Amino acid sequence: MRRAFLILFASCMVLAFFPAIGGEAFAKDGHAGESEIPNPCASLLAILDRPTVSDSACAAPLGHAVLELGYEHASVRGEGGGTAGNYPEAEARVGLPGSNEFKVLLPNYNSQRTPGGASSGFSATAVGFKHEIGYTSRWLGSVEALLTLPSGNYAYGSRGLGIALNGIAAYSLTDQIGLSLLAGLSSQTAPELAGGGRFTSFNTDIVATWQPLERLQFYGEVFGQTKTGPGQGAGYDFDGGVQYLVARRLEIDAEEGVRLSGGLGGFTHYTGAGAGLLF
């Protein structure tokens, strides 16, 4: 397991160092290139992690905090179906010196109703650290580590400590169209209700964005895992949506997701909405 994480971390570093390969990288200490290459993380639409499953390659700006909130309503897979919802999907991010950020993913309240009964409770708390490596006129790269704490209730929490290591690379095809790739390895534990077993997964996420106006952005995303739980196989989903910048520091969004294959998320489709704020 340790060797696998070391290999994955090295791969993430290579992925995130694409900016250094693609051209002259921005010099964060104020040397060559600073006046020539605009900061790709100047807009709140670029900084926000939500509503995509993938995280942004941008770190929270130094001296600022980002708060993201949302709600999701899903149709549950399985015999007889059912519905599920979760909120507030709260994520708080703080910009640190050296193009770094610290984040906290607060517990979600989950509720589910199926023909077999109803359940509710809080998911686990997670903390993370992201380092934005650098950028060129086209590329932006970062690496991040996430820890899922043993927390939450028996039905939706994490029985043990979880860890994920990700590399994120973003590429601008044009001034309006962008692509982002996240690749990572995670080791997580299922909730106690599902047996609490540990499983390791390789995770990928590809996002395409189109920003026809300064305040408006559309996105589409395909994401998946090689394992969705102990003893389970791969799962892949698609989601897409729209983001609108109400003000320079306030964003609202709406999204729709659908299952492609496997049991990732346990839904057939879902609808969500939320907001992001920069302080």
Image (cartoon, rainbow, N blue to C red):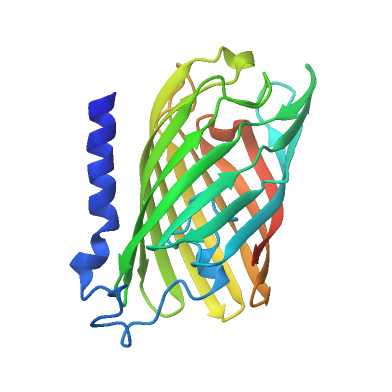
Residue 56 drawn at (x, y percent): 47, 58
Count of number-bearing discs: 0
Q: Nearer the viewer, residue 89 or 34?
A: 34
Is residue 214 found left or right of 6 in the rendered image?
right
Residue 25 drawn at (x, y percent): 25, 73
Residue that extends furthest to the bottom in the rendered view of this protein: 35
Location of residue 163 with respect to 37 vertically, above or below = above
In the image, what residue occupies the spot 67% across and 18% down? 154
Quarter of the image that includes the C terminus: bottom right
Residue 49 in view here? no
Residue 158 in view here? yes
Q: Nearer the viewer, residue 30 or 159?
A: 30
Quarter of the image that includes the N terminus: top left
In the image, what residue occupies the spot 46% across and 21% down? 232
Residue 5 falls in which quadrant of the image?
Answer: top left
Residue 4 falls in which quadrant of the image?
Answer: top left
Residue 186 falls in which quadrant of the image?
Answer: top left
Location of residue 85 with respect to 195 vertically, above or below = below
Q: Nearer the viewer, residue 153 or 172?
A: 153
Residue 7 drawn at (x, y percent): 22, 36
Residue 153 drawn at (x, y percent): 68, 23
Is residue 222 found left or right of 72 in the rendered image?
left
Residue that extends furthest to the top in the rendered view of this protein: 195
Is residue 260 found left or right of 111 in the rendered image?
left
Q: Nearer the viewer, residue 266 or 109?
A: 109
